[in-house]
Amino acid sequence: MAMKAMVVRAPGGLDRIECAERPNPGPPGPGAIRVALHASSLNFHDLGVATGKMRAADGRVLMADGAGVVEAVGEGVTEFAPGDNVVSCFFPDWQDGAPTIPDFSRTPGDGIDGFAQEFVTLPATAFTHAPRGFTHLEAATLTTAGLTAWRALVEDGGLKPGDTVLALGTGGVSIFALQIAKMAGARVIITSSSGEKLERARDLGADETINYRETPEWGARVRELTGGRGVDHVVEVGGPGTLPQSIQTVRVGGHIHLIGVLTGIGGEVPTALLMARQARLQGLIVGSRRQQRDFVRALDGGGLRPVIDRVFGLEELADAFRYEEGAGHFGKIGVEW
């Protein structure tokens, strides 16, 4: 019996995404689980693969995020049972400990087939439980964007009540950062070029907002808003185009979490200012399975629901990516089937 899968044909491009038939994976062997998938969500990384900027094998099944329900468990699997709601891991081989994985060769939807398909049979260690009460669509936003924000602020940054967090923009990672920071009792400053998006961010608890189109020297404004002290954490998704101002905003001994390169892959870094700030500039890519389990445990308490901007069907995946390219979304773009 065949199943549907959304694949991209080499060399990539949104017009080269197609619905293909793939063999339905069989029952799980020892240590594996079979999952009926029902949702995914779009990330900047997925867009790179879909457009061909990040080359994947011809016919690669797209999407790093996947959520669904366990249909069967193989011998030796005790963590999951049929009927459990689960969500995938971005780095299925990174279970715990310090990062050692240098590339995306084992990331679903890039180096291996992803979750834009109806069923998968994979090692149980490639999933965690989904948070209690989350829909499949909500759970699917956690794997990449949610876990990235969690690892940056909580795991690497040691976020604590009373800290001040600067989040750049209103995409998936930044909105999760806003929500996680507020859940932890922190103060949040957020930027956008859209007044409407800043209003929505305020509704989610943002304490201060800055329209960077109206205030191009937003770095100076952040220092003003913190009484000259600077912020404890910067969630830096822009890269070279925004990093100089981000360094300006951070307090002495603060933490800049370099998560994205939306403005390019190289540029000038004001090294003297970074040194004077004695700040930690740390690059990071998502997180480990253990970190994801900790994040899910935090969400089980009910303090946060993912913000989903718009939802597409599985066969509308190319349209979903076109919508992402327009950069008009607030929070996450979902795919559900």
Image (cartoon, helix red, strand yellow):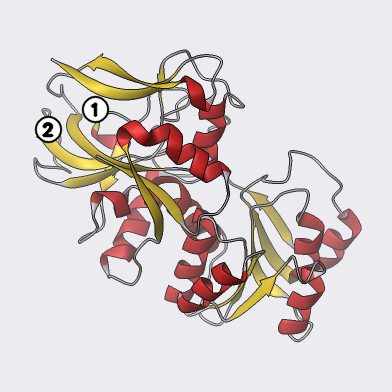
The residue type indicated by label 2 comes to Val
Position of residue 57 measured from the top left corner of the image (x, y, whole percent): 48, 15
Give the mark nearest the N terminus, 1 or 2: 2
Quadrant location of the C terminus?
top left
- Name which quarter of the figure residue 301 lies in: bottom left
The residue type indicated by label 1 comes to Val
As helix, strand or loop, the secondary structure at mark 1 comes to strand
Q: CA–CA distance between discs 1 and 2?
A: 12 Å
Asked if residue 180 shows in the view, the reply is yes
Position of residue 232 measured from the top left corner of the image (x, y, whole percent): 65, 72
Q: Is residue 117 left or right of residue 56?
A: left
Give the label on residue 176, or none.
none
Between residues 149 and 264, which one lies in front from this camera angle?
Answer: 264
As helix, strand or loop, the secondary structure at mark 2 comes to strand
Question: Which residue is found at the position 26% from the left and 16% from the top?
Answer: 21
Between residues 107 and 161, which one lies in front from this camera angle?
Answer: 107
Name the front one of labels 1 and 2.
1
- Name which quarter of the figure residue 247 lies in: bottom right
Name the residue that disc number 1 marks. Answer: 120
Q: Residues within 10 Å of mark 1 (few under 14, many from 20)?
A: many
Furthest toward the right, the residue is: 272
Name the residue that disc number 2 marks. Answer: 73
Q: Is residue 268 left or right of residue 79?
A: right
Furthest toward the bottom, the residue is: 227
Q: Are marks 1 and 2 in contact (CB under 8 Å)?
A: no
Give the mark count: 2
Position of residue 196 measured from the top left corner of the image (x, y, whole percent): 56, 70
Quadrant location of the N terminus?
top left
Asked if residue 104 shows in the view, the reply is no
Question: Which residue is found at the position 37% from the left and 47% from the top?
Answer: 334
Between residues 61 and 277, which one lies in front from this camera angle?
Answer: 61
Q: Is residue 235 above or below residue 97?
A: below
